[in-house]
């Protein structure tokens, strides 16, 4: 059975639960409500509408992101929707 684009997008996106910038750790929650922890490096790139920059400083709890990783380490985190956009959407 093939997976629809909508199903894939729902599974590929996660919500940021906690950001520990000092320790380089990120906790996210997926569609199944299970949380996952990631150890990020200084090479982890966070891509937003504004720019792409290294570090976790661009992330906020509640942001919806997609994580592209290799060997369990995030290489690139793409912000799909900001927490403040989520709170003002008609879906809320």
Image: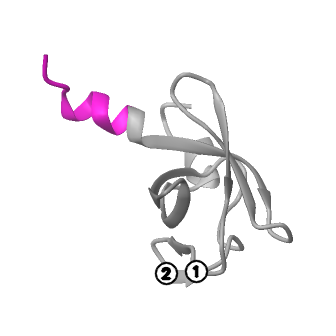
Q: Residue at x 18, y 28 (%)?
A: 4
Disc sitting over residue 24 in the figure: none
CB contact under 8 Å: marks 1 and 2: no
- Name of the residue lying farthest toward the left: 1
Disc 1: which residue: 43
Q: Please give the range of residues in magenta.
A: 1-10
Side of 52 relative to 7 (left or right): right
Q: Residue at x 58, y 80 (%)?
A: 43
* Label whose residue precedes the other's in the sequence (1 or 2): 1
SS class, disc 2 = strand
In this rendering, the count of numbered labels is: 2
Q: Residue at x 68, y 70 (%)?
A: 56
Q: Measured from the top left, where is residue 42 in percent x and y?
A: 66, 80
Crowd rating for badge 1 (residues with CA inside 10 Å; few <14, some 14–19, many 20+): few
Taken as a whole, is the magenta stretch helix, strand or loop?
Answer: helix
Q: Is residue 74 above or below residue 2?
A: below
The alpha-carbon separation of the residues under discs 1 and 2 comes to 12 Å
Q: Measured from the top left, where is residue 1 in percent x and y?
A: 13, 16
Q: Measured from the top left, where is residue 63 in percent x and y?
A: 61, 52
Residue 6 included in the magenta stretch of the image: yes
Disc sitting over residue 52 in the figure: 2
């Amino acid at each position: 059975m093939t997976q629809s684009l909508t199903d894939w997008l729902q599974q590929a996106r996660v919500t940021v639960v906690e950001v520990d910038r000092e320790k380089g750790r990120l906790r996210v929650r997926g569609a199944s409500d299970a949380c996952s922890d990631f150890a990020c490096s200084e090479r982890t790139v966070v891509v937003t509408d504004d720019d792409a920059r290294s570090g976790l400083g661009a992330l906020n709890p509640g942001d919806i992101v997609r994580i592209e990783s290799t060997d369990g380490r995030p290489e690139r985190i793409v912000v799909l929707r900001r927490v403040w956009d989520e709170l003002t959407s008609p879906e809320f």
